[in-house]
Amino acid sequence: MAIAKKALVWSLFAVGGTMTALLFPALMVIFLLISVGHVPDGLSFGNATAFSQSWLGKMFLFGVLFLSIWHAAHRLRVIFHDIGLRADTFMASVLYVLAALGTLLTAYFLWTIR
Amino acid sequence: MSRRPYIRPVSRTAWYMTHVRYKSYMLRELTCVLVAVYCVLILSGLAALASGTQTRWDEFLASQQHLAWILFHGFALVFFTVYQSIAWFGLAPKAMPLQMGDRTVPGGLIVAAHYMLWLVLSAALFWIAGVI
């Protein structure tokens, strides 16, 4: 059982790692543009709402957030172990509960945007 | 067995500072802190959209327009590209070697395919966001 659980979180880590490696640099460029005051057209209130209202947009946003959240949770668990905090069961519980909350919150927000 | 086996002293909290390979391992692992920050940012953006009011969305965009965020996003872009994207693509053929029949696909080809996909998906994201 423990092995099966590990395989599940590890595969989420691996898929999430590939997805973030592919998409996050572009995402960071977009945030950089916003922060210097050049908000791209697609992120106007109307366009951003329309995108998150469409099923394709919802699926895209949920997929990206779901994988990022679980990737980060699993890797943070390893980091806490690596920097000497040897309380793996506790840290894993805290991080995976947070990840589950983040996943639920994502679903709730996407459900609310209609 | 000797009565007093030699135990090499290893720091529990700073062992990764002892070798350049451990250091770059830690830098790669630390990229997930950036992933976590961007998850929170996107979630707060979605919360603003979910409120259904333009004011909340504009407040979210305006909250980013601060020198600290400009520096953060600039740093994140460079750090993440080097220690996550480039590192991850470079490791891909080692983590997932591909075999076709009797032959293994050359590692360089797998890495090149990742870079191509990176280019295409980044362009797609820029197109969706209206950057290009």
Image (spheres, helix red, strand yellow):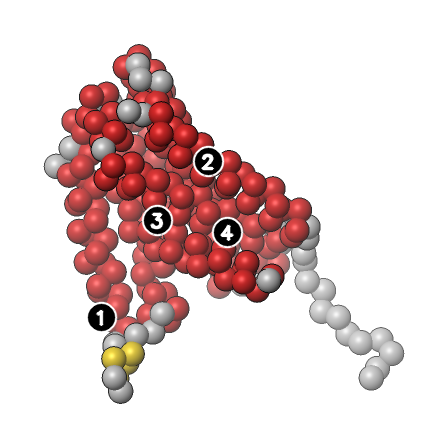
Q: How far apart, in angstroms, are the residues tagged by discs 1 and 4?
A: 28 Å
Circle 1: residue type: Leu
Check if mark 2 and mark 3 are on a common chain.
yes
Circle 4: residue type: Arg
Q: How far apart, in angstroms, are the residues tagged by discs 2 and 3?
A: 20 Å
As helix, strand or loop, the secondary structure at mark 2 comes to helix
Image coords of residue A28 (percent x, y): 30, 38
CB contact under 8 Å: marks 1 and 4: no
Judging by the rendered image, the residue that carries numbered circle 3 is: A20
Which sits earlier in the primary sequence, circle 2 or circle 4?
4
Q: How far apart, in angstroms, are the residues tagged by discs 2 and 1?
A: 39 Å
As helix, strand or loop, the secondary structure at mark 4 comes to helix
Judging by the rendered image, the residue that carries numbered circle 1 is: B109
Number of numbered callouts drawn: 4
Pick the front one: B1 or B15 = B1
Judging by the rendered image, the residue that carries numbered circle 2 is: A104
Check if mark 2 and mark 1 are on a common chain.
no
As helix, strand or loop, the secondary structure at mark 1 comes to helix
Which residue is at 31% across, 17% downward? Answer: B52
Question: Residue B130's image quarter?
Answer: top left
Q: Quadrant of the C terminus of chain B?
A: top left
Badge 2: few (under 14), some or many (20 or more) residues near its Cα, within 10 Å?
Answer: few
